[in-house]
Amino acid sequence: MLKKAKKDNVHMLDNDATKQFHASTNYTQRQLIFRRRRLTLLFTIAFILFASAGVVLFKDQMRLRELKTYAQETKEKNKTTKEEKAALEKEVAQLKDDDYVGKLARSRYFYTKEGELVYVLPETSDSND
């Protein structure tokens, strides 16, 4: 049976061929490590760039959603404001009419024309109290 060789029993040849072989092996190992480190660095930089771009896009998307909501609310507010403006313009036009102003004064403030009588009627309640 063969025994496993101890480290003390293993010796390296000390000639130019083995030295050259070990030098080239060490060089290729260092090149391999250098390439791996460079690739790792490039992937890390690419990941950071894509992650930051993703965060920026996400924030922009959220801002766009907020702006769309704000625009919708503003459109609705504009619509109600236009309706109020139209109602007020109609009321202004009616207030320019003397007959309408007279009717309004008589109904709200109980003004009367000469010879007119005002009768105040009690309000009726629909509920059975």
Image (cartoon, grey):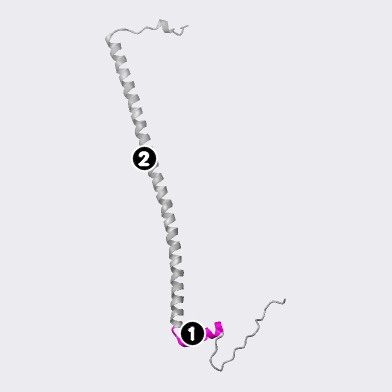
- Residue 122 at x, y = what percent? 66, 83
Mark 1 residue crowding within 10 angstroms, few (<14) / some (14–19) / many (20+): few
Magenta residues (range): 96-109
Seen in the picture, residue 127 relative to 64 is either above or below; the reply is below
- 69 vs 99, nearest the viewer: 99
Left or right: where does residue 91 sit relative to residue 40? right
Q: Can you identify the residue that label 1 sits on?
A: 101
Number of labels in the image equals 2
Seen in the picture, residue 70 relative to 117 is either above or below; the reply is above
Give the quadrant of residue 31.
Answer: top left
Task: Give the number of the disc on residue 49.
Answer: 2
Mark 2 residue crowding within 10 angstroms, few (<14) / some (14–19) / many (20+): few
Amino acid tagged 2: Leu
Asked if residue 55 lies in the magenta stretch, the reply is no
- 100 vs 128, nearest the viewer: 100
Task: Give the number of the disc on residue 43.
Answer: none
Amino acid tagged 1: Val
Task: Determine the residue positioned at 52% across, 84% down.
Answer: 105
For marks 2 and 1 on the same chain, the one whose residue lies earlier in the sequence? 2
Task: Determine the residue positioned at 36% across, 37% down.
Answer: 46
Task: Determine the residue positioned at 40% across, 50% down.
Answer: 60
Asked if residue 103 lies in the magenta stretch, the reply is yes
- 126 vs 17, nearest the viewer: 126
Q: Give the farthest residue toward the left.
A: 16
Q: Main secondary structure of the magenta part?
A: helix
- 98 vs 8, nearest the viewer: 98
- Residue 88 at x, y = what percent? 45, 76
- Residue 57 at x, y = what percent? 39, 48
- Residue 65 at x, y = what percent? 43, 55
Seen in the picture, residue 17 relative to 109 is either above or below; the reply is above
Q: Secondary structure at mark 2?
A: helix
